[in-house]
Amino acid sequence: MKPRSWAVFPSLRGVLIGVQVVLLVLMLGGAIFFVVGVKALVDSQRFVARATATDAVVVDVAGVVKSVRRGSGDSAHYEDVTIFHPVVRFVTAREQEVRFRAREGSEDPSAYGVGDSIRVLYDPANPQDARLDTWTSRWGYSIYLVMIGLVLIGIGTGIYWMLRSRSKLLDV
């Protein structure tokens, strides 16, 4: 009878349990990102299906200061960056005037100018529920969440199966 690997190397048993826990947490986190992303995709699809498109005008540009991580490794640091979000005004099919600040923005202050025409989508039943009619606004954030989830699940699963196929050390 072949002895178990952890019986030969008892100090590895705790390390291997730790590796399994880390991989499980990584895959669980990935699953959460994936599920939240899929729900956001479904919500976006429902919004787009009921939304009405119209032209809007940029009436203001709101600067929001955010702390952004720059660089990597030893040169990583945080710096305050101003993100410029367009504030747009549009008139609904029922002649109701609506203003809102878009969620998406740009570090480039000239990306949006007062007086620019921009396309928006809004919910006719709730015109305050409006967003820019762009790919990022429709799908981008949801796709990013799904992709992050798949990458985390893939990394965790890949490492687990690589370790498992190379040795039976994970048979704890």
Image: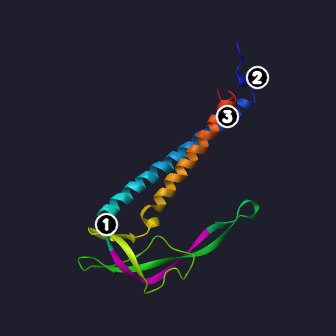
Q: Using the image as rendered, state which of residue 88 and residue 7 is in the foreground.
A: 88
Residue occupying image coordinates x 42% and y 87% = 115
Q: How is the image coloured?
A: rainbow
Which label sits on residue 51?
A: 1
The Cα–Cα distance between marks 1 and 2, rounded to whole angstroms, is 65 Å
Q: In the rendered image, which quarter contains the C terminus?
A: top right
Residue 67 located left or right of residue 125 = right
The dominant secondary structure in magenta is strand
Dot 2 crowding, Cα within 10 Å, few <14, some 14–19, many 20+? few
Q: Mark 2 points at which residue?
A: 8
Q: In the rendered image, which quarter contains the N terminus?
A: top right
User: In the image, is residue 149 above or below residue 52?
Assistant: above
Residue 67 lies, in percent from the top left, at 61, 69
The three-letter amino acid code for the residue at tag 1 is: Ala
Residue 60 lies, in percent from the top left, at 45, 84
The three-letter amino acid code for the residue at tag 3 is: Leu
Residue 86 located left or right of residue 162 = left
Q: Which of marks 3 and 1 is nearer the N terminus?
A: 1
Q: Earlier in the sequence, mark 1 or mark 2?
A: 2
Residue 166 lies, in percent from the top left, at 69, 31
User: In the image, is residue 5 above or below residue 69?
Assistant: above
The Cα–Cα distance between marks 3 and 2, rounded to whole angstroms, is 18 Å
Helix, strand or loop at label 1? It is loop
Q: Give the range drawn in magenta.
A: 54-67
Q: Earlier in the sequence, mark 3 or mark 2?
A: 2
User: Of the residues tagged 1 and 2, which is closer to the observer?
Assistant: 1
Q: Mark 3 points at which residue?
A: 163
The Cα–Cα distance between marks 3 and 1, rounded to whole angstroms, is 49 Å
The three-letter amino acid code for the residue at tag 2 is: Val
